[in-house]
Amino acid sequence: MNLIAPAAIGIACLWAEARGEPHAGKVAVAEVVQRRARLRYASRGTIASTVFWPYQFSCVNTLDPQRVRMFDLDTNDLVVQACQLAWYEAESGSNLSRGAVLYHTIERPPGRKSWPPKWARSARVLEVVRIHRHVFYVDLDARKEP
């Protein structure tokens, strides 16, 4: 038995990473989290290990203020409800992110000298879609979906 439901961890991550995105952007981020778990891409194959894998999702980095806030969410909050809807839509098999396992925001985060991130400029990743303020990528070295 999971002490914390995998969906709760995923929805909290989705809230922290994409709460300001339109529905399609939320669904696409949820797809990336879920796909990474299935592929074991920077993951042991669970939602928890995917979300908490070091330096993969900024919301769980030590100094990110979202890290604490994401565990104090209320299901009566309309934004949390929108994230829940997006999470379950992604679980049902949507593919708005076009197979992506990586994404970043279009805005350079404060304190970053270069943007986009170095991995996004690698020959092994290919941009597949932009949805609102996120750019999504496939990793050509990643395994295919099972």
Image (tube, helix red, strand yellow):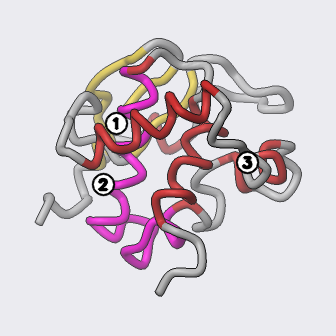
Secondary structure at badge 1 equals: strand
* Quadrant where the C terminus is found in the figure: bottom left
Mark toward the viewer: 3 or 1: 3
Which disc is residue 78 wearing? none
Q: CA distance from mark 3 to mark 1?
A: 25 Å
* First in residue order: circle 2 vs circle 3: 2
Q: Amino acid at mark 1?
A: Tyr
C-beta proximity under 8 Å, tags 2 and 1: no
Mark 1: give few (<14), some (14-19) or many (20+) Cα within 10 Å.
many
Q: Where's residue 67, x and y in %? A: 78, 52
Q: Depth check: 66 or 97 in front?
A: 66
Q: CA distance from mark 2 to mark 1?
A: 12 Å
| Residue lying farthest to the front in this orientation | 76
Q: Amino acid at mark 3?
A: Met
* Residue 95 appears left or right of 68: left
* Residue 122 appears left or right of 15: left
* First in residue order: circle 2 vs circle 1: 2
The span picked out in magenta is: 24-50
Which disc is residue 137 wearing? 1
- Identify the residue position indicated by label 2 in the image: 35
Q: Amino acid at mark 2?
A: Arg
Residue 32 on the magenta segment: yes
Mark toward the viewer: 2 or 1: 2
Q: Depth check: 115 or 135 in front?
A: 135
- Tell me what residue is drawn at x 61 percent, y 37 percent: 15
Q: Where's residue 16, x and y in %? A: 66, 39
Q: Where's residue 70, x and y in %? A: 73, 48
Mark 3: give few (<14), some (14-19) or many (20+) Cα within 10 Å.
many
Mark toward the viewer: 2 or 3: 3
- Identify the residue position indicated by label 3 in the image: 70
